[in-house]
Amino acid sequence: MPLDERIITKAIIDRYFEKIRGILNLDAAIVGAGPAGLVAGYCLASAGKKVAVFERKLSVGGGMWGGGMLFNEIVVQEEACHVLEELGVSTRLYQEGYYTADAVETASTLTSRCVKAGAPIFNALSVEDVVMRPEGIVGLVVNWTAVNMAGLHVDPLAIRARAVIDATGHDTEVVSVVQKKVPGRLKTPSGSLEGEKSMWSDEAERLTLENTRDVFPGLFVAGMAANATFGGPRMGPIFGGMLLSGKKVAELVFAYLESLPK
Ligand code: 48F
């Protein structure tokens, strides 16, 4: 069969626009395709919610690919292994309580399960602001990462979402934006972003789960962003807290969506 470049071009344009037109009105928008965001996307889409993930980089998977210091293995504690098993990632017992997984297998499998569950991922798109109404956050403002990198003066576009999840990791970018717009109004002890503390794996993993919650009307935090928002420490290359946080935020957002008027 002779190939026609015009059809190839049209196929890509048609399919992309079909995909992006389908997510202009979401139940939940997830910012950041790291472990927390991917698990949240998988869980919410599996529960029947209309959800999409927005990732600034071309590659998805966040901080998983390089394991610890580029040794591409990750550690997961026993309590979180069931999340990897549910999603089809192989784990190996290292010593009692500690399991390891191949970082590349983990990143690629979580990505695949998220998309196949029905949560499309829009990569190379940066979330630069939120859409706000008196009742809270009702969407995201997005632009091409390439536009931002080039410093081009180009207006962004907006996406509606009944709930937004900040899963941007250490950057905590959505919460930072909200803090600038409405200073002192976050549901944190100080009303502001508390900031991430130095490494303490055990405490950090416990707090990641505890800190996974709503932080402003319509805005939830998950993963490392939850600790940065509420002042928890970093944990290094142990990923159980991220996986459990993705699951927990999906449950919280599901309950929140169910509580909203239809
Ligand atoms: O950093 P990341 O993997 O966040 P996470 O899911 O997991 C944290 C761990 O990787 C590790 C750790 C513990 O094990 O401390 O760091 O909490 O993924 C966050 C993703 O968000 C993207 C960023 O490129 C990364 O892939 N991101 C950040 N800011 C934006 C964004 C933004 N403004 N718009 C879109 N994506």
Image (tube, rainbow, N blue to C red):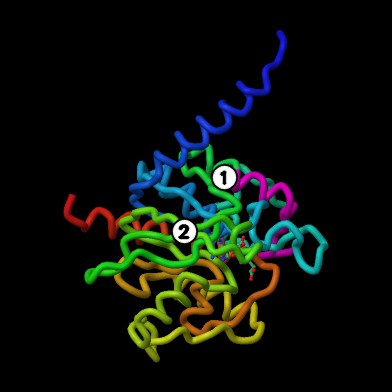
Mark before the other along the chain sequence, 1 or 2:
1
Asked where in the image residue 7 lies, by quadrant, the reply is: top right
Locate ligand 1 by image quadrant. bottom right
Q: Residue at x 51, y 64 (%)?
A: 167
Amino acid type of the residue that numbered disc 2 sits on in the rendered structure: Pro
The amino acid sitting under disc 1 is Leu
Q: In the displayed structure, does residue 82 sit left or right of residue 74? A: left
The question of residue 47 being in magenta is answered with no
**Residue receiving disc 1:** 87
* Residue at image point 67% right, 50% down: 106
Q: Is residue 93 left or right of residue 18?
A: right
**Position of residue 92 measured from the top left corner of the image (x, y, whole percent):** 73, 52
The residue identified by callout 2 is 156
Crowd rating for badge 2 (residues with CA inside 10 Å; few <14, some 14–19, many 20+): some
Q: Which residues are magenta?
A: 95-111
Total tally of numbered discs in the picture: 2
Quarter that holds the N terminus = top right
Looking at this view, name the residue that lies furthest to the left: 261
For the residues marked 1 and 2, what is the alpha-carbon distance in whole angstroms? 34 Å
Q: Residue furthest front?
A: 153
User: How far across and down, in percent of the image, does residue 84 sit?
Assistant: 60, 51
Q: Quadrant of residue 158?
A: bottom left
Crowding at label 1, few (<14), some or many (≥20) Cα neighbours within 10 Å? some
Residue at 36% x, 41% y: name it. Answer: 48
